[in-house]
């Protein structure tokens, strides 16, 4: 059921506040021809384009607009999505949004994500609205005499124009039905309001309803009620087939009746006439391309309509034609099965029984249509309706409905149709050639007979007969003069056959075997010529009409499981299913015919849309083969890995039986054979053109294998890479488990490739690359989704994010310290290694280069987010305050004016204390940045090792190529005129950078992660931040734990501070180093005498020197020269 009861009349008769991507052609636009129906051609073509675009757009509508409950709305988007109630208090709502930063961010995020989708939806709805206006204008122009040779009355009397006028109203109603079915009113309201709020060019008249011309509607209804506008009855000569012949027209009448609800409510005679003509034995109809309507439920609110339908829904009538359908089904199943037997259908049989064959196909299609429509699942509204529920139950019972029989009928019908069509096409193609060949051969036979009776050829029992000689010679001349194009040739051939029979009897020519055989062959040749002359294109047209299958465009989905189960039982069924897919592809002609006639440029676009849907459906049906193949391969690998024992190089005779494992090897062989059968099954299907797209079974199989591989691997990654936040010991165990699983999948593909004729290694490499790239994109999009800078969220989108966050959690600087000597993170209390190079080796062994590279990129985006948060805090919380700016100016002036700071032990802490509110957050951010940078360095190290052992040649080539480009860049900056910059070669540098990242040839500490603007006093602020934490910094050596409890890991902190400074001009870094050198000299000068007496240097000075040494090493500078030589000479 398509329409809800509460919106039938109002929606279909008045509502047109809805919406194609092409400009509209209106009367008066330069296309005013004498015939007004030329405009209707444009209408039909564009309207069918609207429907395809509407079906495409409805798949892209964001879920935020579909959900009803605010609790279900992601990120509370319900607060910024409104229905038409928005217009009652628009100013208050907009004011509320302006005063709430969270709502502003959500509103901006919604617009950024869905602006293009909203615009597409709006355009489609707007075009439906335009169509209604243009249709009204066309009718007004016809009535007003704008077209000199056409009026509304003349348009309704012409053959083609009558079809177009009826289709114009019918398809408009279909658009409204499709719109209401797939984009309900509440969703349309939200879409339109969102469009209204996001653009200043919104058309307010889109909310207005568009009534249609009453005279036009009434004339269309009368025409549909009384005429056979498509002349379909010619293809259905039997009276009992009348409702099937008029099925298309019945659907048009059903839709158009909603534009004149008075007929449905009050005009019983008209409704009775309609039901008796169109719905005497059916109550479920195909509205358009698989959209169905159950009249028992659809006409329930209408008194006249339901009263007229009551006779059709009478229990005795239902039982009567249901039982008759069952008897017919049994008969045609047997007949169609018989005709499909090998060798049954041949040219002789088809030409001799063409009427019977077409009649059988007609019965098959009518029965198939009736069963498929009336057995289809009921919509919730129809299921709750007593009439429709009772009618279907009674039909199922009395027709002894069996879905397998209907599927078998569909299979038989489609196969028989395909074979007969191929016969007819071949005959039409070869008709003239064969006819000419038969004529020449029959002429030769007749000439031979003439020669036999001339007496020149001696043959026993054949005497000279001059009259027969002359007669056969004249007959041969007559045959020679025959022409296939002449209408009289059929009669001449028929007379010749009769004459040959009479001659044989009259002259008693049966006594001679040679003469009798020659006469028999000649008659057969003439009969073949007669049959060939009857071959005509009308047979194909008749098959096309009776084989209409557009009603199953949606219903066919209910038979998908049956097809797949059949494939599981018999993989060779795939070859026979091809005929069903071809039959289904014929349904595409319905929406394309008017577009083609109108000469619209959208023909290709619409064809691609429907062809894409069909190819996708074929892929879904055949996907069962890759599924079964993968299931079998998983079992094979399990047996090979866990059950079969590897044979030793030498084997004792007594142990042969133990190692044989015959039952297991038999099971492996059986499973392998099943894999081969499934591959053979799908490869037996020929390459087929579906619309304008070609379906290649081998490609479908490979795509299915790829999809199954990605599905299984993604599920495995999501299941294993889930970590306990309270434990640090399960990381490596999970990585080892994952490594075994991934190795199993890889081995499966390697084992399978020999049996399914595809490159398993290539598929593995390509699909893993795509899977990790997609997961990386998802994770990075979530990290970068916020409009305001914030610290990295602890929530992950997928396994890449969870693994990355687990590495960060395990190596948390608050509980661990980094040991450079061991290249490991150690627990601060136990000194036990919690993460080291083995961890990254385990990651590489489990998810390869793709995984390591993806983690590296996620860390890069996290660093960028953390940097933005750090700089946001610096700028907004410190530098926007004028007091702080003045304070920094004074501090900078003080430090700059003197070489040494007096009493630095108290001076520096006092300066840093003024920023104590912000310092903890900045320190934590610096540590996070440094921690992630250190993990990136470990990843780069692992990638370098792996490329060295696994692809040394690639490593050498990339390094050499990188060196060449660096040389060219340097030469360019030395003399730009003589040497061009490599960036002029397009994507060369970005592509090489990607390759270098994958082999670990990068230095994370020298990368730029985000764009940054100049920040005043940043070097001073970073110096104060560092000096405030200098007494907490630890630089452990040889794996020692930090000397200060609760201290800061010096290596991590230094790397974080360096990363921040590296994103600004080198002068900032230089000034920072000068501040630090001044601090070290001041500290040392103040404590010089004490240092010389005790022979030791305070920890603060040692930390300062160590920090400056490390950060200068990271930056590649020599700022240590600013430190006093006395200090540097100290041990």
Image: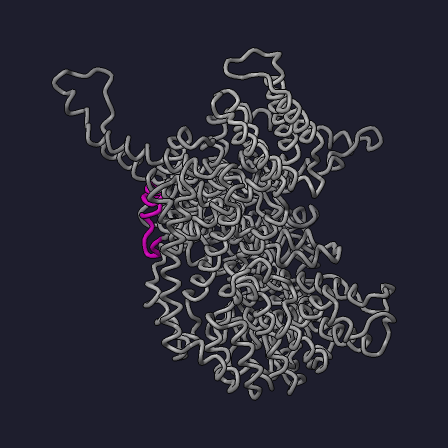
Q: Position of residue 203 (x, y in %)?
A: 74, 75
Residue 728 is covered by the magenta coloring: yes
Whether residue 474 is visible to the viewer of this picture, yes or no, is yes
Q: Position of residue 924 (x, y in %)?
A: 50, 58
Location of residue 897 with respect to 70 vertically, above or below: above
Question: In terms of depth relative to the viewer, which is nearer, 1042 or 825?
Answer: 825
Question: In terms of depth relative to the viewer, which is nearer, 1013 or 729?
Answer: 729
Q: Position of residue 1063 (x, y in %)?
A: 64, 49
Image position of 434 (left or right of 337): right
Image position of 351 (left or right of 564): right
Residue 40 is covered by the magenta coloring: no
User: Residue at position x 70%, y 81% from top?
Assistant: 211
Image position of 805 (left or right of 77): left
Its colouring scheme is one colour
User: Residue at position x 53%, y 13% from top?
Assistant: 459
Kindly give the residue lying farthest to the left in the view shown: 654
Question: In terms of depth relative to the viewer, which is nearer, 942 or 992?
Answer: 992
User: Residue at position x 14%, y 20% from top?
Assistant: 655
Location of residue 640 with respect to 1077 vertically, above or below: above
User: Residue at position x 32%, y 53% from top?
Assistant: 727
Location of residue 456 with respect to 450 vertically, above or below: above
- Which span of residues is magenta-colored? 723-738
Q: Position of residue 1043 (x, y in %)?
A: 39, 48
Location of residue 44 with respect to 494 vertically, above or below: below
Q: Tag count in the figure?
A: 0
Whether residue 930 is visible to the viewer of this picture, yes or no, is no
Question: In terms of depth relative to the viewer, which is nearer, 745 or 586?
Answer: 586
């Amino acid at each position: 059921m398509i329409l809800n009861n509460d919106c039938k009349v109002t929606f279909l008769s008045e509502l047109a506040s809805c919406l194609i991507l092409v400009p509209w052609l209106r009367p008066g636009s330069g296309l005013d021809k004498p015939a007004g129906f030329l405009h209707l051609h444009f209408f039909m073509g564009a309207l069918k384009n609207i429907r395809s675009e509407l079906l495409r757009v409805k798949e892209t509508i964001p879920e935020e607009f579909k959900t009803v409950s605010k609790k279900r709305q992601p990120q509370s988007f319900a607060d910024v999505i409104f229905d038409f109630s928005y217009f009652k208090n628009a100013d208050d709502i907009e004011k509320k949004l302006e005063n709430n930063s969270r709502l502003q961010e959500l509103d901006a995020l919604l617009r950024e994500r869905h602006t293009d989708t909203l615009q597409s939806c709006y355009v489609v709805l707007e075009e439906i609205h335009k169509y209604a206006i243009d249709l009204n204008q066309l009718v007004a122009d016809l009535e007003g005499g704008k077209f000199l040779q056409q009026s509304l009355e003349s348009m309704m009397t012409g053959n083609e124009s009558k079809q177009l006028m009826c289709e114009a109203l019918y398809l408009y109603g279909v658009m409204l039905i499709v719109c209401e079915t797939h984009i309900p009113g509440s969703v349309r309201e939200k879409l339109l309001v969102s469009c209204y709020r996001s653009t200043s060019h919104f058309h307010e008249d889109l909310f207005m309803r568009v009534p249609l011309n009453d005279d036009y509607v009434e004339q269309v209804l009368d025409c549909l009620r009384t005429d056979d506008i498509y002349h379909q009855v010619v293809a259905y000569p039997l009276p009992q087939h009348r409702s099937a012949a008029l099925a298309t027209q019945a659907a048009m009448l059903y839709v158009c009746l909603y534009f004149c609800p008075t007929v449905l409510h009050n005009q019983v005679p008209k409704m009775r006439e309609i039901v008796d003509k169109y719905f005497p034995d059916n109550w479920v109809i195909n509205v358009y391309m698989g959209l169905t309507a159950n009249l028992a439920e659809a006409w329930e609110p209408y008194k006249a309509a339901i009263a007229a339908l009551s006779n059709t829904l009478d229990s005795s009538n239902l039982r009567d034609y249901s039982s008759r359908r069952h008897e017919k089904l049994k008969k045609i199943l047997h007949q169609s099965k018989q005709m499909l037997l090998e060798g049954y259908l041949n040219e002789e049989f088809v030409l001799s029984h063409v009427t019977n064959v077409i009649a059988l196909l007609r019965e098959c299609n009518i029965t198939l249509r009736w069963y498929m429509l009336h057995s289809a699942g009921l919509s919730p509204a129809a299921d709750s309706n007593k009439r429709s529920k009772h009618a279907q139950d009674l039909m199922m019972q009395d027709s002894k409905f069996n879905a397998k029989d209907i599927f078998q009928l569909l299979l038989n019908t489609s196969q028989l149709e395909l074979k007969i069509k191929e016969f007819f096409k071949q005959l039409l193609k070869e008709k003239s050639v064969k006819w000419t060949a038969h004529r020449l051969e029959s002429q030769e036979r007749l000439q031979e007979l003439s020669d036999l009776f001339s007496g020149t050829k001696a043959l026993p029992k054949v005497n000279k007969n001059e009259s027969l000689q002359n007669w056969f010679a004249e007959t041969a001349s007559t045959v020679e003069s025959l022409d296939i194009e002449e209408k009289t040739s059929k009669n001449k051939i028929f007379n010749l056959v009769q004459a040959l029979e009479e001659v044989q009897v009259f002259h008693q020519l049966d006594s001679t075997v040679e003469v009798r055989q020659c006469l028999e062959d000649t008659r057969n040749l003439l009969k073949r010529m007669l049959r060939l002359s009857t071959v005509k294109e009308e047979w194909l047209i008749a098959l096309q009409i009776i084989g209409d299958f557009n009603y199953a465009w949606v219903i066919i989905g209910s038979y998908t499981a049956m097809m797949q189960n059949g494939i599981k039982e018999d993989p060779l069924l795939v070859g026979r299913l091809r005929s069903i897919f071809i039959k289904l592809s014929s349904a595409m002609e319905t929406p394309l015919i008017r577009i083609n006639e109108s000469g619209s440029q959208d023909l290709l676009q619409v064809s691609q849309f429907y062809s894409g849907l069909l190819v996708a459906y074929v892929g879904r049906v055949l996907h069962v083969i890759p599924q079964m193949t993968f299931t079998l391969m998983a079992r094979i690998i399990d047996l090979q890995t866990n059950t079969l024992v590897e044979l030793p190089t030498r084997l004792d005779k007594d142990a042969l039986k133990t190692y044989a494992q015959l039952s297991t090897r038999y099971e492996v062989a059986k499973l392998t054979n099943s894999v081969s059968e499934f591959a053979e099954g799908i490869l037996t299907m020929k390459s087929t053109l579906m619309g304008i797209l070609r379906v290649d079974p081998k490609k479908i199989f490979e795509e299915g294998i790829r999809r199954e591989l990605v599905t299984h691997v993604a599920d495995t990654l999501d299941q294993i890479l889930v970590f306990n936040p309270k434990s640090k010991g399960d990381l490596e165990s999970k990585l080892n488990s994952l490594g075994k699983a991934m190795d199993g999948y890889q081995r499966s593909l390697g084992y399978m490739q020999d049996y399914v004729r595809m490159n398993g290694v290539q598929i593995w490499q390509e699909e893993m690359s795509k899977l990790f790239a997609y997961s990386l994109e998802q994770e990075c999009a979530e990290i970068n989704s916020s409009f305001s800078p914030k610290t990295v969220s602890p929530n992950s989108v997928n396994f890449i994010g969870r693994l990355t966050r687990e590495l960060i959690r395990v190596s948390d600087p608050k509980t661990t310290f980094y040991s450079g000597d061991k290249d490991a993170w150690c627990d601060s209390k136990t000194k036990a290694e919690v993460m080291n190079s083995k961890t990254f080796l385990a990651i590489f062994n489990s998810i390869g280069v793709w995984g390591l590279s993806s983690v590296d990129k996620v860390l890069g985006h996290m660093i960028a987010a953390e940097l933005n948060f750090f700089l946001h805090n610096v700028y907004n919380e410190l530098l926007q305050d004028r007091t702080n700016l003045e304070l920094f100016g004074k501090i900078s002036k003080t430090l700059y004016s003197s070489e040494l700071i007096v009493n630095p032990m108290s001076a520096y802490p006092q300066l840093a204390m003024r920023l104590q509110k912000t310092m903890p957050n900045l320190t934590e951010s610096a540590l996070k940045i440094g921690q992630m940078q250190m993990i990136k360095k470990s990843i780069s190290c692992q990638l370098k090792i792996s490329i060295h052992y696994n692809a040394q040649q690639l490593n050498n080539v990339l390094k050499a190529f990188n060196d060449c480009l660096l040389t060219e860049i340097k030469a360019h900056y030395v003399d730009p005129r003589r040497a061009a910059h490599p960036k002029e070669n397009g994507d060369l540098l970005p592509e090489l950078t990607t390759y270098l990242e994958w082999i670990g040839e990068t230095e994370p500490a020298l990368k730029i992660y985000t764009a940054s603007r100049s920040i005043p006093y940043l070097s001073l602020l970073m110096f104060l931040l560092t000096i405030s934490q200098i007494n907490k910094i630890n630089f452990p050596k040889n794996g020692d734990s930090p000397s200060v409890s609760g201290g800061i890991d010096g290596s991590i902190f230094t790397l974080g501070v360096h990363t921040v400074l590296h994103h600004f001009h080198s002068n900032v870094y230089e000034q920072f180093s000068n501040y630090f050198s001044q601090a070290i000299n001041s500290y040392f000068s103040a404590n010089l005498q004490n240092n010389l007496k005790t022979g030791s240097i305070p920890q603060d000075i040692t930390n300062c020197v160590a920090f400056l040494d490390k950060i200068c090493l990271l930056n590649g500078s020599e700022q240590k020269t600013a430190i006093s030589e006395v200090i540097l000479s100290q041990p």
